[in-house]
Amino acid sequence: MVLALEHVTRTYDERRALDDVSFTVRPGRMTGFVGANGAGKTTAMRIIMGVLAPTSGEVTFDGRPLTREVRRTFGYMPEERGLYPRMRVLDQLVHLGRVHGMSRAAASERAAGLLDQLGLAERSHDPLQTLSLGNQQRVQVAAAVLHEPRLLVLDEPFSGLDPLAIDAMGDLLRSHAAAGVPVLFSSHQLELVEQLCDDVVIISDGRVVSMGSADDVRARRSGRRYRIQVEGASPVADLVGGITGVTVVRGDADTVLVELDDSVDDQALLSTVQAQGVLREFAVVRPTLAEIFREVVR
Amino acid sequence: MNDALSAWQAIRVIAGREISVKLRDRAFIGSTVFMLVLVTAATLIPVLIQQRVPSVRVAVQGAAAAQVVERAAELGRQAQESGTSLPPALAVFGEGGLPSADISTVEVTQDGSVDTLVRNHDVDAALVGADLAHLTMLGAQGVPSELDVLVRAAASEIQVSDAATRAGLSPDQVTALTSPAMPVTVLLDANPTGEVPPQLLVLVFAFLFYLSVLTFGMSIAQSVVEEKQSRVIELLVAALPVRWLLTGKVLGNTVMALGQIVVILGAGLAGATLAGQGQVVSQVLGASGWFVAFFLLGFVMLACLWAVAGSLASRIEDLQATTVVMQVLVIVPFFAALFAMEPGPVQRVLSYVPFTAPLLMPARVVLGNAAAWEPVVSASVVLLTGVVFVLVGARLYEGSLLHTSSRLKAMQAWRAGR
């Protein structure tokens, strides 16, 4: 049950919100969808859910083009809100369950169970707008998973949550992924994505700039970046900066972060710096997602 | 499980939510109760007013005064008895044009103070005098008009009869003088007793339609914007086709609007039945068939457009601007219909124009100046217009529903509609 976007393009008047976007969301894995504001995350998610139509390209699930009947089995959480502010919490969930084809009885039972699980049982007869933002967000998640979806698409599920709620939300999404459901979520909190995700898709200006498993993305992006610490040869930056093919990213008296182009042999560099003083560190540096993100988006 | 969701089931779920939200809406409940009270009062109060016979307390001093008041009381009683067979508007007056009244008397001896009784409002008026030719009526600020008329009639009748007897006329001749035969008024197109004038009935129906379309239309538009503003619409659209959503919304609100009208009419009819106005009940029931049919068609025709007006807005605050056209489309036909209440070519034409037809065609049926085929043709015109509006509305709705960032123009929505 793989969700795949194939060469999806979407234009608004003149502007290209999505430009030939292709990526997959695999079963049993959490896929983080990362991009700056306006990069096209929400547009892509809306196209997956059929809320928007792509200008060209296609979205498939399990190899077949998506229909409304298939999409009805997906769980979706729109950006910011997505519930009736003045409707009671339980009534609201039951209604959305029925919209997704559940019987009233089944929806009631499941909704009550979820609210209990989320610690909101005693608020189930209150209007949604009387709940705190964090609790509203929990109800929102309950609405997305109510009908045991075959795919979860969540737009910024972590925004506005306190650290404990973030953990709870993470656990909940994990449990669905562990049950074999593909989970796609967008977030600005890159540390969180790094910590939670199996796969990452980075999007910038409507184009996918990097994707794959989180480890792969980091490894691929790490390129040839080294941290070198030498004692007694100051400044290190002057020492290595003179070598052709070596670029200093940043550095101070003892330590320097350098990037090597393909012409430079790292072993030769190693012996060069070793000859200059006491070598304390010579290490390949893997960038964090946040670093990669800043770099590719710039 | 999921694939089994049919269009009808989904529409029912959407309509069901609209209904349950309405049933919990304080404004809706409040306005319904208010209308119920208004209608019940409107049916009961005129009846109570009509049947009230004024009771008057009169102090009398002197033999002549006593004789006159006694006769006046008799006349007032007769007027009551004869009045029951007359139309309500005339029921307060008896056959000879005399008002009905319950007159009770308080005898005051020659040395008693009549003035004090009148001033203290122990009696409504007093009649003083031992001689028929010199009677005085005393009142505090005024004298009840019924009493005034009855006393004058009684006094003149007694004097004429006395004079006639003195002149030696036979008892028959005396009767002819004192109770002359009056011409009988016969109305050729008279309404049966207790019937409401048809113009009034039409006005009430028109007002109910106008009020219902305006309040429900506004609430449809609001509920659409609420879904847009809260982005619930994204969840719904991901699961259900937009047309089903629109249909469910319109259906739910139509059921509630129709339900409200039926309850209000029912309360009015129940009130009329309790007040013994059986004629009104059968008259209204007879007229309400076409009214309800046109109400239904007219409501559905406009409901889709109200939903579109809501979907063109992106926030509640925009609604005033996007619903202006709709408000005009409801208010202008309402006043046009009021001004075209008199039968004539204008009324005939307007009763076929889709916006005014729901008001004027049932009116023509009730007023009795429409041929049997006319409401059928007019209803078909409204129905066809409704179908066109539903199709246009659905496309505009689809085109504008997901545009959440700013207000839309109808043309933009049309182009965006798939």
Image (tube, coloured by chain):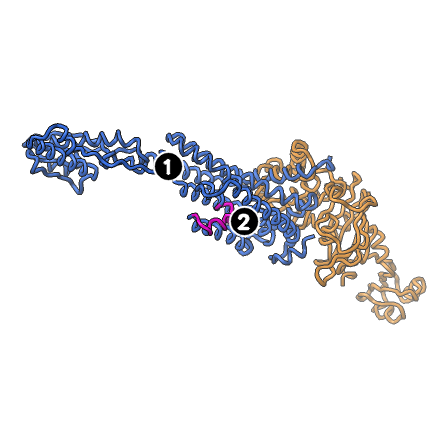
Q: In screen coordinates, is B43 left or right of B60?
A: right
Q: Are marks 1 and 2 on the same chain?
A: yes
Q: Secondary structure at mark 1?
A: loop
Q: Name the foreground residue: A103 vs A266.
A: A103
Q: Residue at x 86, y 61 (%)?
A: A226
Identify the subunit bearing mark 2: B
Of badges 1 and 2, nearer the viewer stands 1
- Which chain corresponds to the colour orange? A
Give x and y (percent) for residue B8. 66, 37
Give x and y (percent) for residue A207. 78, 58
User: Mark 1–mark 2 contact, CB under 8 Å?
Assistant: no
Q: Name the foreground residue: A216 vs A8.
A: A8
**Mark 1 or mark 2: which comes first in sequence?**
1
Using a 10 Å C-alpha cutoff, classify the residue at mark 1 as few (fewer than 14 neighbours), some (14 to 19) or many (20 or more): few
The residue where tag 1 is placed is B191
The residue where tag 2 is placed is B354
Q: In screen coordinates, is B269 left or right of A227?
A: left
- Which chain corresponds to the colour blue? B
Give x and y (percent) for residue A293. 77, 58
Which quadrant holds residue B199? Answer: top left
Q: Name the foreground residue: A298 vs B280.
A: B280
Quick check: A248 above or below A221? below
Q: Please give the range of residues in magenta.
A: B343-360
